[in-house]
Image: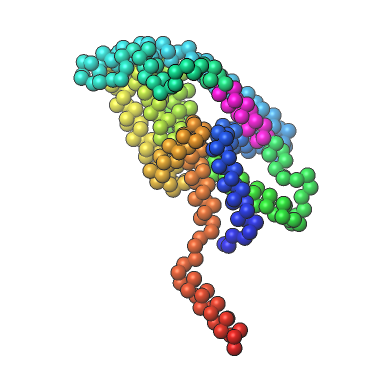
Amino acid sequence: MKMNRTTQISFGLIALFLILMAALHLGTFLLTFLFGYLVLRLCAYNRSKAVSVAAYAVAVVVILGGLIYFASLAYRTLPKIADTAIPAMVGFAEKNGIDLPFTDYASLKSTALAEAQEGIAIVGRYAGLASIQSVLALAGLVVALGVFLNPLWAVEQAPQPTNAYEAVTRELSERFRTLYDCFARVMGAQIVISAINTALSALFLAVTGYPYAVLLVCLVFLCGLLPVVGNLLSNTVIVGVGFTMSPRMGVTALVFLVVIHKLEYFLNSKIVGHRIKSPMWLTLVGLVVGERLMGISGMILAPVVLYYIKVEASRYPIPKAADEHAEGLEAAEAEARSIE
């Protein structure tokens, strides 16, 4: 397949779009747009857009309500867990000769904020960032609904492109369709892995009688949506809560989570690796770059963008050397005939 000029322009525009998303820190907007469109596609019912929109609205309200509940529960509970878990972990570390960078909750907060500049109103800054991200998330959900209701780039569109604008926008539609397909494929695999991990973790928490089980189960699922590093975050909290029960329970939780981590690594290779066929080191590089550019949303989008680049580039294979040689001979022969 050869790339014509219109296709080249569309690739340039989609590259510019992704660069602007990163430069302007609009990862939340892009992520919620793709996720919202995914929910809309799942809610599609017998081609009735009214029913689909109603189901989408219900799904968005339920998801947002769940996230608000989880955030409120985490805000109230996590400091209590830290106040109890950190002294227990420090005591266990001292007994076994392990050095930790903190000794209590206050020193942990100081360690976490060591790189923050003095004099910055952290609460106000985070509140402002949260407000901006909330607006971007809402905008992404609204744009997803608009694209679902009317995906055309113009009010009227001819069956065949009659000008450059229509030709380029058709190619752009194909680029965005491929980007969405990549997102659905990667995110679908990540949700499956997170659901399996959450189910096994929930079973362990129920059998061992863990406190704060609801919070921990929600944390495991949400963190599981972050490739590779997500489970490290949730596992740290689970082990910490285990130490509030007893050092033995903390170690037991650590051993169990190591086994789960090995299982998840296998699932990643079988599910995500089978779907996107991307090496782990490349995914890790993408996660680091995505986090630096767009934060958590960039980490979620990194495997999607990597897979998208691979899919698009794979559509235009490089001709084999033999084919190139044959084409060169044919051109030379044609030129010789024209001279004669």
Quadrant for the C terminus, please.
bottom right
Indicate the quadrant where residue 96 lies. top left
Question: In the image, which residues are magenta?
Answer: 129-145
Image x and y of residue 199, in percent: 43, 27
Query: Quadrant of the image for the N terminus?
Result: bottom right
Q: Is residue 259 shown left or right of residue 301? A: left
Is 184 placed left or right of 51 in the picture? left
Task: Give the quadrant of residue 135.
Answer: top right
Residue shown at 49% from the left, 66% from the top: 319
Location of residue 159 in the rendering, given as x and y in whole percent from the top left corner: 75, 54
Q: Is residue 69 visible?
A: no
Q: Residue at x 61, y 84 (%)?
A: 338
Return the x and y of residue 56 as percentages of the image width and height: 65, 30
Q: Give x and y (percent) for residue 85.
A: 34, 14
Which residue, as the protein is rendered here, is positioned at the far front? 119
Instruction: Look at 59% across and 85% down and name the residue there.
Output: 339
Residue 91 seen in render:
yes
How would you classify the magenta stretch by its main secondary structure?
Answer: helix
Does the magenta-highlighted stretch encompass residue 153? no
- Return the residue nearer the eye: 234 or 16: 16
- In the rendered image, residue 142 lying in the magenta stretch gets the answer yes
Work out whether 4 lies above or below 188.
below
